[in-house]
Image (tube, helix red, strand yellow):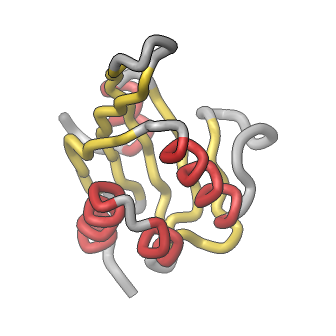
Amino acid sequence: MLNTEQLGDAVRAALESADLTGLADLLDPDVRWGPPGDSVSGCHNRRQVIDWYELARRAGARATVSEVIPGDDKLLVGLRVTRPDARGRADEDDRWQVLTVRAGLIVDIRGYDNRPEAASAAGVQL
């Protein structure tokens, strides 16, 4: 079983290489993904999360991991997301995800537009 720091390294490697099989191996079968405080919308299992990444990739989205900060049972993951706009030019945004870890697997993913808010949710010091 991976500790939080090792899992962070594995998440970085999977996201940077677009290794969706490797990413799937890090997700609990019943992983949830969505906005903070919302348990209804978003993804409700591993397959849905991987399908979302596959669709985004096919639409031209790319992500570069800018940081991974391990906490006790969470990871703060910073991403630089690039997507083509309507004219085909690159549109870039910084995004953060808080990944909750249990028994060495990611059980919950929450997306944030704001780094301090995400860090607070992850319980990590900036």
Q: Nearer the viewer, residue 15 or 40?
A: 15
Q: Position of residue 97 (x, y in %)?
A: 43, 41
User: Which quarter of the rendered picture does the N terminus lie within?
Assistant: bottom left
The foreground one among 27 and 115 is 27
Q: Is residue 12 above or below residue 39?
A: below
Q: Eyeballing the image, is 43 above or below 72?
A: above
The C terminus: image quadrant? top left
Seen as rendered, the residue at the extreme right is: 40
Any part of residue 102 in sight: no
Q: Is residue 85 above or below residue 100?
A: above
The residue at the far front in this view is: 87
Q: Is residue 26 left or right of residue 108?
A: left
In the shown orientation, is residue 80 left or right of residue 122?
left
Image check: 76 left or right of 98? left
Quarter-of-image position of residue 47: bottom right
Q: Name the residue located 32 percent from the left edge and 26 percent from the top edge.
A: 94
Relative image position of residue 118 (x, y in whole percent)? 40, 33
